[in-house]
Amino acid sequence: MLLYDETYDMLITNPQPNIEELPEYYKSEAYISHTDSRRSFFEKAYQLVKNRAIKKKVRRINKLHPQKGKLLDIGAGTGDFLAKAKAKGWEVNGTEPNAKALAIAEEKGIFLNPGIQNPEPQSHDVITMWHVLEHIPDTEKQLSRLKSLLKPEGTLIIAVPNYKSFDAHYYGAHWAAYDVPRHLWHFSKTSITKLCSDNDLEVIRILPMYFDAFYVSLLSEKYKTGRMNIWKAFRTGFLSNYKAFFNTGEYSSLIYIIKHRNNDSKAV
């Protein structure tokens, strides 16, 4: 069941699992973010697109901070994003609570911690959360902590699903990005903006994640009908991006570029 929070214009998973129970929901082989599996056509396609998306993410942070610096990735999964950033000259560290993903990342030379390990305040140039905030039980506490770790000219990047997208409306309860109970919160532009504002942070730019409309539609078709229905999913994903591009701006997932409030720096 999803409850609507009018103040933040967001949906809340209800009931929510206890914090102690949460790790159990990530122990499935089907949770592809914690594996490098390439057994099926779908997994191979996912890993291929993931690698292309990672390159784009690294180009984005390089453009925002051409001098490089310290990068912290929250919920780093199997470490591919940090590995690519490290190869491009970033000093990287990250967190990942899943033991299996931690071990895979270590094989790539990326040593993650289960949680934030008390770094110096205002010590990071860039902090990223790629589809992670929706999993965090206490979003206010998390944002406050990340703000304290961000340099005055630093950048916080948050990517989350957007429940106001066309594909979310089309699939309704079958929309894969609801991913209950792993996803505790379901954000809109308003909710992210308000959550940031509550912590003296400011959203300075919002960017689309085009591929998510296709990936989420593919999973949603399977949840709805029991089959992938590739062409129908492609059509829905295309329509979602089309409507967002030409009318609503409500893409399936959105990237928020965030700075300290009253920071005069501009996003690139």
Image (spheres, rainbow, N blue to C red):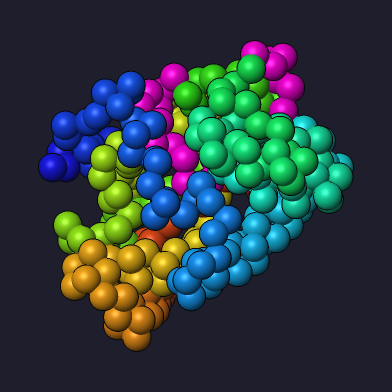
Q: Is residue 238 above or below residue 145?
A: below
| Residue at x 28%, y 50% (from the top left corner) | 178
Left or right placement of residue 59 versus residue 188 in this view: right
The foreground one among 263 and 109 is: 109
Query: Is residue 93 magenta-colored?
Result: no
In the rendered image, residue 66, in percent from the top left (x then y), is placed at: 83, 47
Left or right placement of residue 48 versus residue 191 in this view: right
In the rendered image, residue 186, in percent from the top left (x then y), is placed at: 30, 44
In the rendered image, residue 264, in percent from the top left (x then y), is placed at: 68, 36
Quadrant, the N terminus: top left
The foreground one among 223 and 232 is: 223
The foreground one among 12 and 182 is: 182
| Residue at x 71%, y 33% (from the top left corner) | 111
Q: Is residue 80 above or below residue 167?
A: above
Looking at this rendering, what residue extends furthest in the bottom direction? 231
Looking at this rendering, what residue extends furthest in the front direction? 39
Q: Is residue 28 above or below residue 139?
A: below
What span is in magenta?
118-141
Query: Is residue 121 magenta-colored?
Result: yes
| Residue at x 54%, y 59% (from the top left corner) | 37
